[in-house]
Amino acid sequence: MVCAMRKAGVLSIVLVAVLLAVAVVAEAQQAKKVPRIGFLGAAYPSTNAARIEAFRQGLRALGYVEGKNIIIEYRWAEGKPERLPDLAAELVRLKVDLIVTTGPTVTRAAKEATNTIPIVMAQDSDPVGSGFVASLARPGGNITGLSTLAPEVSGKRLELLKEIIPKLSRVAVVGISTRPGNAQSLKEVELAAGTFKVQVQYLDVLDVKEIETAFQAATKGRAEAVLVLQSPFFNSQRKQIIDLAIKSRLPAIYPQTDYTEAGGLMYYGANTPDLFRRAATYVDKILKGAKPADLPVEQPKKFEFIINLKAAKQIGLTIPPNVLARADKVIR
């Protein structure tokens, strides 16, 4: 009887030890859970290479190494915005810890897919106007991140056009009225135009077929330069836009660096890779327990000015030396 009791006691001790070991292993596995985040883009990965690398650099600086202690699920609409809702829903089904978005169209798709998974905007021209956040200081909801909104940008773009064309009196502004943030951007251009005594000809483009029509209207309206407002759609059609500006011999300033890299004349605005680098900070804070509602939306800290001299030569334009000297990058 005593022997049997001893055996039972030993078995109980062993069982307890095994259960404790299992609990410790389970706890260790839980502690080592690798976060999985979604990265949703409207274009192609090839056209976003610099931004992706900047985001990865930001993560590495915070101790995250992709594939080791963080997993990134990339999804790309490849220039087809109608695919975004399905791609966003796919990331939600994967139960990612958060979703990083590359622009307002993407953010809207993510917002419609989830109101619980945190969303980090790598860039957005007007997150309040788009209805993504209640205010920059107190976003509320599940969305926060970075805004490209800076009141001086549109005025500076017009000022640069005025500097390269001192007698500039008419500028064509090409935009999309249905795009979030378009109205605010146009308002900023019109305010600056009043200062520089430049008449604005606004050209609304709602379809790919209307791009060429817009440039024809700009020529007919005797525009002396073109200012293109930001839009993922325009970015996907940037080769056609650049070609039409050159064909029309109109100096143009663009809203993204992709244009100057593709042969466009000028870019001035937020340093986009820097915004993507800073987006990693939001990822880190949220993964450590911060709520998007409590993280203020931040604005650009770095700006850049790029001139493409090849494009200038194609339209017979000479860039004044004092303007050229201020460029952060000159494409020759």
Image: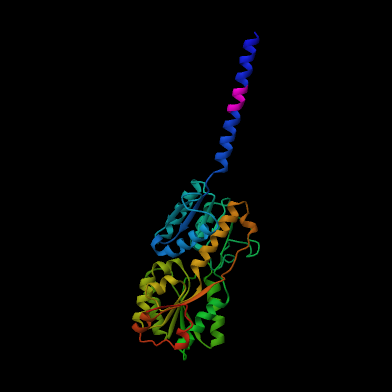
Residue 119 position by quadrant: bottom right
Residue 250 in the image: above or below residue 21? below
Residue 61 in the image: above or below residue 189? above
Q: Quadrant of the N terminus?
A: top right
Residue 148 position by quadrant: bottom right
| Residue 297 image position (x, y, % from top left) | 60, 64
Q: Quadrant of the C terminus?
A: bottom left
| Residue 258 image position (x, y, % from top left) | 42, 70
Between residue 91 and residue 115, name the one nearer to us: 91
Between residue 182 and residue 3, name the one nearer to us: 3
Question: Can residue 261 be spotted in the picture?
Answer: yes
Between residue 58 and residue 286, name the one nearer to us: 58
| Residue 249 image position (x, y, % from top left) | 36, 83
Residue 22 position by quadrant: top right
User: Which residues are drawn in magenta?
Assistant: 13-18
The image's colouring method is rainbow
From the viewer's perspective, is 288 left or right of 91? right
- Give the number of marks: 0
Residue ID at (45%, 87%): 164
Q: Which residue lies furthest to the bottom in this view?
A: 167
Question: Can residue 178 be spotted in the picture?
Answer: no
Residue ID at (53%, 84%): 193
Instruction: Based on the picture, tell me whether residue 203 belongs to the magenta stretch.
Output: no
Q: Is most of the magenta stretch helix, strand or loop?
A: helix
Instruction: Based on the picture, tell me whether residue 16 belongs to the magenta stretch.
Output: yes
| Residue 229 image position (x, y, % from top left) | 48, 73
